[in-house]
C-alpha cells in the first residue's frame, strides 16, 4: 500500500468527502490560495472554488458562529483554526451554542460541524501557539474530541467526524503533519470511540495520545532490549472514549503509564486513570498507576526549554522502568 503524509491524508479526506457531498465546505483564515497555516488545504481552492473554500476574516468567533449557523441550516462545515490555542476565542460559540443546541431542542436540531485544530508544541511557536487544550473541550457534554496519531487514523477519523451529527473537535498535532503511514486511496471510515493497540505487549500498558504515541513506540523499542514488553494503546478519540479496550489491556499487563503532552494537572490523562481505577482492572494492578504530562508552565519558545516542558522518549523509558521495579 502507498505511504502518504499525515498532511496529505487530511487533505485527501476533505477533498474526497467534498466531491461526494456538496453540503461540506471549508472555512478558515488563509485556507485559500495560501493553503492554510500548515499547507493542509493547499490546492483545494483550485478544485472547489472560493464558495466552498472560504477565506475568512481574522475572527475565530465569527468562523465558529458561521459554522454553527450553517450547520443548523443543513450544511456540514469544516472550520480550521490556524492554531488550536485560538479555540479560546471561539469558546462561547462552541461551548454554549454548538455543544448544547441539539439537547436544548430535543434532537430536532443538530450541529454537524468539524473544528480542525492544529495543536501541540515542538515548532518554537511559543506560549500562545503551542498549547494542548483538549481537556477543556472534552469536559463539555455535546462536543466530541478526536486526536489521530497517524495518517491512516487521520483520514478515517475525519470521515467519521464529518458524518457525525454532533460538533467534533479534531486535533492534528503540528509535528505529525510530515509523518507517513500506509493509507488506502479510497475513502474509508474509522468509527469514533474505538481505540487502537499500536503495539501488543505483556508487561506494561502505555496509554498515549497524539504525538506521544510515537514517543511511546520509540521507548518500547529501547525497553525491549531490557526485556520489558510494552503494550502501546492509542485511544484515538477522547470523547467518546473506548474504555473497554483500555481496561482489557491493563488487566493483561497489570501496570499502566498514561502519557500526554498537555499540562499534567487537570489533563485528560487523569480521566483515563480514573476509568481504570473505577473498573475491574484496578484489582489486576501490580503497581500504582503513573502519569506523565507537561510541566505546569507556559510553553517556552527556546527549543531546548520547549523539549523539557513536555514528556520525551527518555521520560517514558524511565517511567516504565520504575513501574517494572515496583512490586
Image (cartoon, grey):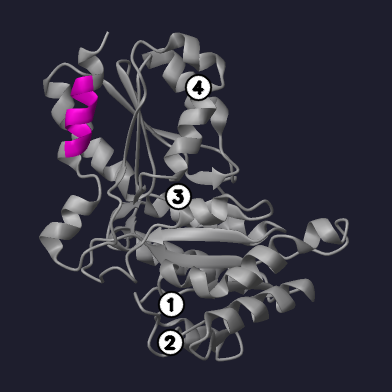
What type of secondary structure mainly makes up the magenta span? helix
State the CA–CA distance, disc 2 to disc 1.
Answer: 9 Å
Q: State the SS at label 2.
A: loop
Q: How crowded is mark 1: few (under 14 residues within 10 Å), some or many (20 or more)?
A: many
Would residue 219 appear left or right of 33 to someone viewing this image? left
Question: What is the span of residues highlighted in magenta in the rendered image?
Answer: 315-322
Q: Check if mark 1's residue and mark 3's residue have beta carbons within 8 Å.
A: no
Mark 4 vs mark 1: in front: 4
Residue 321: in magenta span: yes
Residue 53: in magenta span: no
Q: Check if mark 3's residue and mark 4's residue have beta carbons within 8 Å.
A: no
Q: Mark 4 points at which residue?
A: 277
The earlier-in-sequence mark between 4 and 2 is 2
Quadrant of the drawing holding the C terminus: top left
Q: Check if mark 2's residue and mark 3's residue have beta carbons within 8 Å.
A: no
Which mark identifies residue 153? 3
State the CA–CA distance, disc 4 to disc 1.
Answer: 42 Å
The earlier-in-sequence mark between 2 and 3 is 2
Q: Name the residue under label 2.
A: 30
Q: State the SS at label 4.
A: helix
State the CA–CA distance, disc 1 to disc 3.
Answer: 18 Å
Residue at image coords 47%, 39%: 235
Would residue 261 appear left or right of 157 to someone viewing this image? left
Mark 3 vs mark 4: in front: 4
Residue at image coords 61%, 76%: 64
Q: Name the residue under label 1.
A: 41
Amino acid at each position: 500500500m502507498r505511504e502518504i503524509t499525515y498532511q496529505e491524508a487530511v487533505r485527501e479526506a476533505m477533498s474526497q468527502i467534498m466531491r461526494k457531498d456538496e453540503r461540506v465546505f471549508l472555512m478558515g483564515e488563509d485556507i485559500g490560495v495560501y493553503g492554510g497555516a500548515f499547507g493542509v488545504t493547499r490546492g483545494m481552492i483550485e478544485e472547489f472554488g472560493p464558495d466552498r473554500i472560504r477565506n475568512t476574516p481574522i475572527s475565530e468567533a465569527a468562523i465558529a458562529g458561521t459554522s454553527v449557523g450553517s450547520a443548523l441550516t443543513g450544511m456540514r462545515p469544516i472550520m480550521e483554526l490556524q492554531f488550536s490555542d485560538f479555540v479560546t476565542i471561539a469558546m462561547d460559540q462552541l461551548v454554549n451554542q454548538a455543544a448544547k443546541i441539539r439537547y436544548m431542542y430535543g434532537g430536532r436540531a443538530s450541529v454537524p460541524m468539524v473544528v480542525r485544530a492544529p495543536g501541540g508544541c515542538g515548532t518554537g511557536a511559543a506560549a500562545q501557539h503551542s498549547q494542548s487544550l483538549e481537556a477543556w473541550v472534552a469536559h463539555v457534554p455535546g462536543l466530541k474530541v478526536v486526536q489521530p496519531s497517524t495518517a491512516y487514523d487521520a483520514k478515517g477519523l475525519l470521515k467519521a467526524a464529518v458524518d457525525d451529527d454532533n460538533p467534533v473537535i479534531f486535533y492534528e498535532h503540528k509535528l505529525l503533519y510530515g509523518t507517513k503511514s500506509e493509507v488506502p486511496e479510497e475513502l474509508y471510515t474509522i468509527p469514533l470511540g474505538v481505540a487502537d493497540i499500536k503495539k501488543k505487549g505483556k508487561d506494561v500498558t502505555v496509554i498515549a495520545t497524539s504525538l506521544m504515541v510515537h514517543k511511546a513506540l520509540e521507548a518500547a523499542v529501547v525497553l525491549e532490549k531490557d526485556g520489558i514488553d510494552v503494550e502501546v494503546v492509542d485511544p484515538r478519540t477522547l470523547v467518546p472514549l473506548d474504555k473497554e479496550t483500555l481496561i482489557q489491556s491493563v488487566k493483561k499487563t497489570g501496570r499502566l503509564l498514561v502519557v500526554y503532552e498537555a499540562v499534567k494537572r487537570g489533563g485528560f490523562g487523569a480521566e483515563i486513570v480514573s476509568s481504570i481505577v473505577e473498573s475491574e482492572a484496578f484489582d489486576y494492578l501490580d503497581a500504582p498507576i503513573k502519569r506523565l504530562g507537561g510541566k505546569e508552565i507556559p510553553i517556552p519558545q527556546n527549543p531546548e526549554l520547549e523539549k523539557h516542558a513536555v514528556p520525551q522518549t527518555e521520560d517514558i523509558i524511565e517511567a516504565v522502568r520504575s513501574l517494572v521495579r515496583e512490586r
